[in-house]
Image (tube, rainbow, N blue to C red):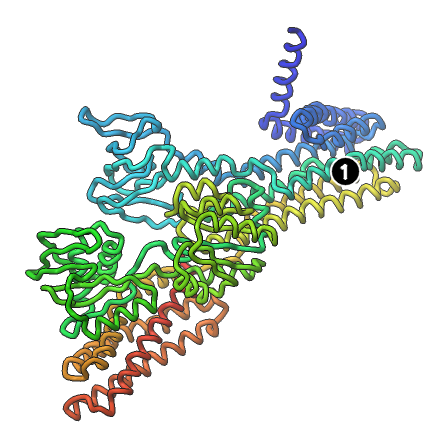
Amino acid sequence: MPHRTRTTRLRRLTAAVVSPRLEPVLLAVTAAALTAGGIAWLTGAVGPADLLWGLGTLSAIVPAAAWVLAALRHGHAGVDLIAVLALGGTLAVHEYLAGALIALMLATGRTLEAAAQRRASHDLRALLEHAPRSARRRTDAGVATVPLAEVAVGDLLVVGPGEVVPVDGRVESAAAVLDESVLTGEPLQVERAQDETVRSGVVNAGGAFELRATATERDSTYAGIVRLARQAGAESAPVVRLADRYAAWFLPLSLVVAGLAWLIGGSAVRAVAVLVVATPCPLLLAAPVAIVSGLSRASRLGVVIRDGGALENLGRARTLLLDKTGTLTGGRPRVVDVTAAPDLKPTEVLRLAASLDQYSPHVLARAIVDAARERGLDLSIPSGVTEEPGRGPTGKVDGHRVSVGRPNTADARPAWARAVDNRALLDGAAVAWLTVDGHLAGAVLLRDPLRHDAPRTLRHLRAAGIERLLMLTGDRAAPAHEVAAVLGLDDVRAELSPADKVAAVRAERERAVTVMVGDGVNDAPALAAADIGVAMGAHGSTASSEAAGIVLTTDRLDRLADAVTIAQRARRIAVQSALGGMLMSLAAMAAAAAGLLPPAAGALLQEGIDVAVILNALRALRVDQTARPALTPAAEALVHRFAAEHDDLQDVLDSVRDAADRLSDSPGPEALAAVEETHRLLTERLLPHEYAEEHELYPALAPTLGGPEATATMSRAHTEIERLSRRVATHLQLAHTGGGLSSEQLDDLRACLYGLNTVLRLHFTQEEENYFSLAP
């Protein structure tokens, strides 16, 4: 019992001595002792000066010894042992000034390292502190605050202004205004309408609203992110373990050099000088500081990294495997084209289809409604809506019997409809047919489009040293190969099962350090099998997030390139800090052993080495401007403005294609009217947009992109768009003069319209990928 009591007391004493509160106190004591001793020495009081310096030395020996014991108890080499030996040696040979300097160095290094770690882990701690602990639940008896663990799926919750959304749910009120920056890193507020989903962890930036819980605390988005954040930095990266191994041989090497200096030089002072410059307390913490700083920097961009090992491995990765749907593509279908029968316009086809689809829960229906709202179309309220599984909804819109989906008519399809079928096959698109009063009236083509930021991201990854880019997908081969061709991937493997993906990942791991990126439940095994799994956590499954070492909490693929750049930079700085400090210490030890560096001067030199190395490690916290071009606020506002205009102008692009198709089908008055309408849209809406881009957006982007030459090819596209538009106008003048379109005009006019459609779509895509993807 007495032995246990002594052990318990010793542990309590050690814990008290190594308390973080001691470090600033020790720094103040040692600094005061050194300063007071210096003043006494300057006044000629040598004895009091030595006494003050000796007391400063003694004040550091006790905590240093406690730090050594604490390290040994955790299985570490205890590199502070060199500091203890150096402090004791200075007292033994009466080098009190050197002892005071070592004490100050030790206290300064420990305080600086603690401050660095607190700063580096600030964002991760903030993430944990932000986690809600309770929720306000509404029942028939009123509103009561309950622990978050008691919230069940289906509960009706009240979220007040400024409160954190406690669990994943669905908005029950008319609308909710939210700040999602904690999850996405983007400071813009968003509005969620009734029945829209809301993720836990976001902040209510508007008035109070009601939320219907769709997940428990454990299964909610923020809880999964918190579980990852609690593990961040818990494991040492391999580069940090190198520093630990360095300490294991550096200690005996220091003792050997000190012993040889004493033996050969015949002076104990030389041995003490060697121990003084060999004191590596804060030096060996520089590598962990760099790694933790990298974790913090990544978290600010919406990239949660599970531990230092994942960060270090990401910095060494050479192969990247990517899923297609939800990773390289948006994961949601979008309207890519609208085709109308000869007696309708594409905008009317989209409006009628969206009006009816407001009542349909189908994923394609939501995409059609979203497209119509983006284009500012006024939707009608349908009546008598019914939906047959596999067919789509049917109902009355503006007095007409309308259906959207698979057509019910058994009649032979007209030529324009057969052309739609061919286009859908070639483009890998789904088709939602619009039937009005029993007749085919139009078609909406939908496809899961490539992410705008995907091409830029993959270019940056290649520039960062990723040598092999592959796609692993369960989708059909044709659309997979099309995406791979656009992105310039090295290989694509389609129609894979989860087991096939795991086998492919293991095969690639045998060649190089491998990263797997995915978002679905079927990606979870492959993420776990890779050296580093990266989950698209913003809209991905919980299973993939749990299996991944890295989670992108914002729905942007370019954050992956940022994470790779941060990881490489943090690893490079960690290695620089460890190797640089080691080489400087070895050089100083050699000088001290030769008698060229007395203990006091050696202590000052080692202080400078330690501080310099830790400050170098803190560089990992800074933003690397080369990783992502920084837009000015004015340029960012312009990017958002013109991106919104691209959405608004989609009906103009549809009109150009529709007019060309009508010329092919029947070059009569209706076709001429379609061309005239297209010319009006070009003149009134499209060309002013292109002019504004040329004279407002491009000059604003030029400083970021390196000068006006960066946008020169895009300016040339503006010129071609204007040229083709003038050519169409000339054809219309000839038609008005001649009383209609002549046969000699048809081929050239058709070529102008199809060419204009191609140039516009390519130009829009290039701007979205190269310019609009720069803005958060």
Which picture quadrant has residue 408?
bottom left
Instruction: Confirm whether residue 136 shows in the render.
Output: yes
Residue 670 drawn at (x, y percent): 15, 80
Give the position of the N terminus as an image quadrant. Answer: top right
Q: Is residue 212 left or right of residue 12?
A: left
Residue 629 visible in image: no
Numbered disc 1: secondary structure: helix
Give the residue furthest to the top: 1
Which amino acid, mark 1? Phe
Residue at 67%, 32% in the rendered image? 107
Counting from the top left corner in percent of width and height, residue 415 is at 21, 75
Residue depicted at x 38% and y 65%: 768
Query: Measured along the vertical axis of the image, is residue 494 above or below residue 570?
Result: below
Q: Is residue 183 left or right of residue 620?
A: left
The quarter of the picture where residue 69 lies is top right
Q: Quadrant of the C terminus?
A: bottom left
Q: Is residue 563 left or right of residue 96?
A: left
Across and down, in percent, residue 363 comes to: 27, 53
- Label tally: 1
Q: Is residue 540 above or below residue 265?
A: below
Tag 1 residue:
250
Q: Residues within 10 Å of mark 1 (few under 14, many from 20)?
A: some
Front residue of 157/418: it is 418
- Residue 270, compared with residue 743, is above or below; it is above
User: Which residue sits at x=35%, y=27%?
Assistant: 149
Q: Along the line of sight, which residue is nearer the eye, 34 or 537?
A: 537
**In the figure, is residue 12 to the left or right of 501?**
right
